[in-house]
Image (cartoon, rainbow, N blue to C red):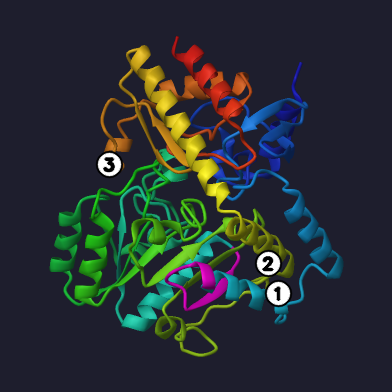
């Protein structure tokens, strides 16, 4: 008998490309039918059949407090009762700007947008406008959204789908995109030597969380800061994943490296569609209507999204114990996985920091994109379905992160480790 999810997937494939509105949801790399989720609460999601799953996706990161947090839900309801969108200036977007500038170390000014992709696209434009240069540097395996110029060895869903780049991107859009090797400072120096005075910006995921979770080597981010400063190039941190997840000050606070610009995504909206970019005042004053770099959006600073975001960020600000709890869960999980792998003689790699983790199915230490690609995705697919069948909801891709949330307890981690142990048995 066909399940509800199977029926919905068949219907979806007739009207949505691949049956989904975002590629990784299609289970293409792991096979089978995606679970259609009907509701979520705390640390669980429930599919259309009513089956409950312990959720490690968390809407790809923003549900750091758990699903459907009552305070955020109430803030959304109250904001919606006043109206869903005005297309005009509002007090609540001013409050959000003030809050973000008080929390993010590099923010003197901020511009609200509607997604992480839009934030990255706009920050690149601002960097080019400020420097008067065209070329940018990105890193293999780092994903910065589906922005034309950055869909080059872009990690995440592109890796999952086995697509090295994207069709439909004119060569001219990517001709000024230079690609370096993550954690390899010499590859960066070489690009600067080959393109003197031409590089507007270097953009990086400070923790590469779209090719699994790959940590920066000690001193790597500081070296990037120094090289950018020496060359008059803007350093952009893409904190769509790390922002407000590694801590209240994101990766820039955690690693003590100050970028010129930074981008954030859905976590600043409590899961609502939102993003922002910001940085030094002299750069942000290039943005219209003050300056000549144009960027606009009718829904930017949407009052409902602002209400959700202010509520979530205020909770995180007022309750530092959230991060201590998440750190404890993450460490417990990673140490538990190491013990399981050792016991079963598997030389796979468990990586992570704070509430981010990834299990790579490779015996090779993972420090960059090429290392990540050595993972055995067929074994991952078996692992994914085993975990799913046992009520553990993981991202359907070897190259995505495991996200912990504050609603989780140690018993949830212990249960997950027990299921993993039975898989490796």
Q: Earlier in the sequence, mark 2 or mark 1?
A: 1
* Label of residue 306 in the image: 2
Percent from the top left, x then y, of residue 66? Answer: 65, 43
Q: Secondary structure at mark 2?
A: helix
* Label of residue 150 in the image: none
| Residue on which disc 1 sits | 92
Residue at 68%, 67% in the rendered image: 306
Q: Is residue 108 magenta?
A: yes
Check contact, mark 2 vs mark 1: CB within 8 A: yes
| Residue on which disc 3 sits | 367
Residue at 48%, 34% in the rendered image: 397
Residue at 66%, 28% in the rendered image: 53
Q: Looking at the rendering, in which quadrant would you find the N terminus?
A: top right
Q: Secondary structure at mark 1?
A: helix
Residue 263 visible in the displayed image: yes
Q: Secondary structure at mark 3?
A: loop
Range of the magenta residues? 102-114
Percent from the top left, x then y, of residue 162? Answer: 41, 38
The one nearer the camera, 223 or 290, is 223
Q: Is residue 199 left or right of residue 343?
A: left
Residue 400 visible in the displayed image: no
- Callout 2 environment at 10 Å: few (<14), some (14 to 19), or many (20+)? many
The one nearer the camera, 291 or 53, is 53
């Amino acid at each position: 008998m066909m399940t509800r999810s199977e029926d919905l997937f068949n219907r979806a494939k007739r009207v949505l490309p691949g049956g989904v509105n975002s590629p990784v949801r299609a289970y293409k790399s792991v096979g089978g039918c995606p679970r259609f989720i009907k509701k979520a609460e705390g640390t669980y999601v429930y599919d259309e059949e009513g089956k409950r799953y312990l959720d490690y996706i968390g809407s790809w990161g923003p549900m750091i407090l758990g699903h459907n947090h009552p305070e955020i839900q109430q803030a959304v309801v109250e904001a919606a009762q006043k109206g869903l969108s005005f297309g005009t200036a509002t007090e609540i977007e001013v409050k959000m700007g003030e809050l973000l500038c008080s929390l993010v170390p590099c923010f003197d000014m901020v511009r609200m947008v509607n997604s992480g992709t839009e934030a990255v696209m706009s920050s690149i434009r601002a960097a080019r406008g400020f420097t008067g240069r065209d070329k940018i540097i990105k890193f293999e395996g780092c994903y910065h959204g589906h922005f034309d110029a950055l869909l080059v060895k872009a990690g995440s869903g592109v890796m999952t789908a086995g697509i090295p780049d994207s069709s439909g991107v004119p060569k001219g859009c990517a001709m000024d995109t230079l690609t370096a090797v993550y954690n390899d400072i010499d590859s960066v120096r070489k690009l600067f030597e080959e393109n003197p005075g031409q590089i507007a910006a270097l953009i990086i995921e400070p923790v590469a969380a779209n090719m699994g979770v790959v940590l920066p080597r000690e001193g790597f981010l500081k070296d990037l800061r120094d090289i950018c400063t020496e060359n008059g190039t803007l350093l952009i941190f893409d904190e769509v994943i790390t922002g407000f997840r590694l801590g209240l000050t994101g990766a820039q606070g955690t690693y003590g490296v100050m970028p010129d610009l930074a981008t954030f995504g859905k976590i600043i909206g409590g899961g609502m569609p939102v993003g922002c970019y910001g940085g030094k005042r002299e750069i942000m004053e290039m943005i219209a209507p003050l300056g000549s770099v144009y960027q606009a959006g009718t829904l930017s600073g949407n009052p409902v999204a602002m209400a959700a975001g202010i509520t979530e960020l205020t909770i995180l600000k007022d309750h530092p114990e959230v991060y201590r709890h998440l750190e404890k869960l993450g460490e417990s999980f990673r140490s538990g996985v190491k013990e399981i792998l050792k016991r079963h003689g598997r030389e796979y790699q468990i990586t992570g920091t704070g509430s981010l983790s990834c299990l790579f199915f490779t015996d090779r230490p993972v420090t960059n994109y090429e290392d990540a690609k050595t993972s055995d995705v067929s074994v991952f697919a078996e692992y994914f379905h085993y975990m799913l069948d046992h009520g553990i909801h993981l991202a359907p891709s070897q190259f995505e992160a495991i996200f912990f949330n504050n609603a989780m307890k140690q018993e949830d981690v212990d249960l997950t480790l027990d299921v993993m142990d039975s898989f490796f048995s």
